[in-house]
Amino acid sequence: MNKLDALIKALQDDDKVKRFQELETIINNDASLQKEYQRLLKAQKVLVNYEHHKDPKLKKAQAQYTNILEELGNHPLFNEFIDLLEWINDDLVLLQKIFESAINEK
């Protein structure tokens, strides 16, 4: 097993990653949660687009995104899902920085 395979296996075996995958399956199989999650993702895309283009509708988009997030926040599984998603994303960003640093050193 090479180093990349070992890293992938370590990530896959992580308890938080496993729990995230469990929650993702639950959300994907719950039509109501899935619909609301897709609504959140759509609002997030609009928000990012408005931020990028400095659109005057940005404040309205931020409010809409926040409202949807708060609605979903009432569901405990979704809160845990978002927390784990942020944790995983932070780890992936850290790994990317480590790789970039190692590449730039060589």
Image (tube, grey):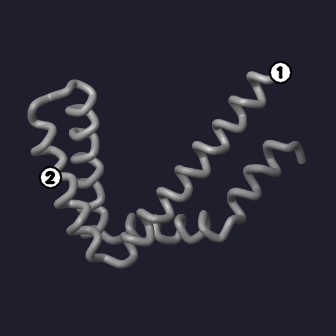
Q: Residues within 10 Å of mark 2 (few under 14, many from 20)?
A: some
The residues tagged by marks 1 and 2 sit, at their Cα atoms, a distance apart of 46 Å
Asked whether 26 or 88 is in front, the reply is 88
Q: Choose top left, top right, bottom left or bottom right for residue 54.
A: top left
Amino acid on which the number 1 mark rests in the picture: Lys
Residue 36 percent across, percent down from the top left: 24, 62
Judged left or right of residue 33, residue 9 is right
Eyeballing the image, is 26 above or below 50?
A: below
Extreme residue toward the right, this view: 1
From the image, which quarter does the C terminus lie in? top right
Q: Residue at 60% across / 46% down in the picture?
A: 92
Residue tagged 2: 64
Residue 75 percent across, percent down from the top left: 30, 76
Which of disc 2 and disc 1 is earlier in sequence? 2
Residue 37 percent across, percent down from the top left: 29, 59
Q: Are marks 1 and 2 in contact (CB under 8 Å)?
A: no
Q: Choose top left, top right, bottom left or bottom right for residue 26.
A: bottom left
Asked whether 55 or 5 is in front, the reply is 55
Eyeballing the image, is 71 above or below 52?
A: below
Asked whether 91 or 3 is in front, the reply is 91
Q: Residue at 48% across / 58% down in the picture?
A: 85
Amino acid on which the number 2 mark rests in the picture: Gln
Circle on res. 91: none
Residue tagged 1: 106
Judged left or right of residue 36, residue 3 is right
Report helix, strand or loop for mark 1.
loop
